[in-house]
Amino acid sequence: MSALVLTHVTKRYGTRLVLDDISLELARGARLGLIGPAASGKSVLLKLVAGLEQPDAGTITVLGDTITRPHVREVDLGELRKRIGMLFQSYALFDFLDVAGNVAFPLEQRGGIPAAEIAERVAARLRAVGLAGSERKLVGELSGGMKKRTGIARATVADAELVLYDEPTAGLDPVTTQKIYDLLAADQQRTGASVLAVSSDVAALAELVDEIAFLYRGKIVYRGPARSIRDAPDPLVRQFVRGELDGPLTEAIG
Amino acid sequence: MSGPVERVGAAALDRLRAARDLWRLYVSTIAGLGRALARRRDHAGPPRGELGRQMFHIGNRSLGFVIVTLGFIGMVVTFEACLQLSRVTGDYSTVGGQMIRLVISDFGPTLTAMMLATRVGAGIAAELGSMKVTEQIDALRMSGVLPVDYLIVPRFIASVLMTVVLTVIGTLVMYGAGGLTAWRSFAVNPSLYFDISLVRPRHVAIGVLKAVAFGAAIPIVAGFCGLRARGSSEGVGWATTAAVVGSSFAVIALDFVISAAALWVTGGDL
Ligand SMILES: Nc1ncnc2c1ncn2[C@@H]1O[C@H](COP(=O)(O)OP(=O)(O)OP(=O)(O)O)[C@@H](O)[C@H]1O
Ligand SMILES: [Mg+2]
């Protein structure tokens, strides 16, 4: 069974066509990276997959459940979402809770997990992302990188079956970036979760995922193995990944 | 491209859609109330003590505000009434009786709720609006939480309870301040003013009904505005303004509807 199937998904905001007839499949346990220029719709795609936004056309099936209307209502999505871990690009931390409260939240909302076990898992997660000792800090007291790492801890604490990472390491220093990617890879090894990760750090992303898809002008114009993404046959992708100034991408952007 | 007719049509459609969404929020809040009652203690939901916290927020923060406002209005209204009477008959015997009826079934609940609409409405809209624009609402949803259950239901219950409590306090203060004014400025005998024999159970019932309706409307309208906030802090500002205007308007509209219904039910004999 597939972890994720998108068929002919279209999403508009006003007159702007953000996603244009996208079809995409992700097998269970597979790891896909998503790259693309700024404002190409990567975050929107993740939100559609999480059911946080509805597409204008097309259907989306996540972990076997169709989540697009009219098949489903918001009330019915709760149980499915508990099986999904999501890291938001802008962290989306709860500012009425401290760091430990944020990380504990998904576990508490599952219900039936003893408080002692929650505390233990939260402490372990915070150690893993290098935030031991910051448990009682409020969100307003955190640096950008600490927020990111709190978000990662919250997204991964409940061992989800599908994880969606929106820029897991943007704004982190190189050493922490490496540590976070090692952690995400180890998590994935342990849980066998399916991964959909958006990142601008293509080199680090390539170590976490098997395949990389390139989103451009509302379409997935390329999908291929992550290892050889620098030598992708598509000149658009090659130029984007290598960060070259001359090429079809620059000409298209003008 | 789009002419004036299309624009008016689109605006009207927007309004209709907003009204439908507001109604849906109301329905899901009632459903959420049911879910909250059916929920097992160890199960997910708002943190323990959230209802108490919300009641404290609403009640404690607005108490002084309500007392001062209704006290002053009680003085002004009574003074005006006595002044008019002094020019006509000079008979003050009915001032207290008319005042208590007016205060119980109209001024008390309506003025209290107007105060709460500004204060509580703005607070709820700003809080939920900033959660919306920082995607905290989406993060709640990703943990399998219904924002209505987690955020609106506790505020709804707290607002209904505290509006009733504050209405009782506001009514007593307004009536009392009026009695004080009548006594000090026009030498109306307090035992004459504080004669409540004309108050009938239906007056109290109307007052309580209004307080409950207002207390229910404020968090729904304000929560609705907050959850619709878009963009960044500017969007939160807009949402807050809309919440104050919308919930004040809801109070006045409900006041009219309930008063009219009460007149109709009693056949004009209030
Ligand atoms: N809620 C919204 N309302 C209106 N427009 C939106 C909304 N969300 C996204 N958009 C628009 O959709 C487009 C894609 O946005 P998205 O956030 O997915 O970009 P992105 O690929 O994640 O970019 P970045 O790499 O900068 O994060 C943008 O043009 C954005 O303005
Ligand atoms: Mg993005």
Image: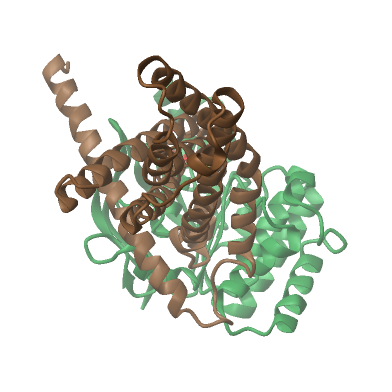
Q: Dividing the picture into quarters, in which one does residue B92 lie?
A: top left
Query: Relative to A204, does residue B176 appear above or below in the rendering?
Result: above
Q: In the rendered view, how is the structure colored? A: by chain
Name of the residue lying farthest toward the right: A133
In this rendering, does residue A196 appear at all?
A: no
Q: Nearer the viewer, residue B228 or A11?
A: B228
The location of residue B4, given as percent across then percent down, is: 15, 15
Name of the residue lying farthest toward the left: B5
The location of residue B95, given as percent across then percent down, is: 42, 34
Q: Nearer the viewer, residue B256 or A164?
A: B256
Query: Relative to A215, does residue A104 appear above or below in the rendering?
Result: below
In this rendering, does residue A228 appear at all?
A: yes
Q: Residue at x 35, y 54 (%)?
A: B209
Q: Nearer the viewer, residue A111 or B164?
A: B164
Q: State which chain is coloured brown.
A: B
Quarter of the image where the C terminus of chain A is located: top left
Number of callouts:
0
Q: Nearer the viewer, residue B130 or A92?
A: B130
Q: Residue at x 59, y 79 (%)?
A: A191
Q: Dividing the picture into quarters, in which one does residue B46 lie?
A: bottom right
Q: Residue at x 77, y 66 (%)?
A: A126
Chain A drawn colour: green
The location of residue A111, given as percent across then percent down, is: 56, 80
In this picture, residue A77 sits left or right of residue A89: left
Query: Relative to A254, does residue B269 appear above or below in the rendering?
Result: below
Quarter of the image where the N terminus of chain A is located: bottom left
Q: Residue at x 41, y 22 (%)?
A: B90
The location of residue A144, given as percent across then percent down, is: 73, 43
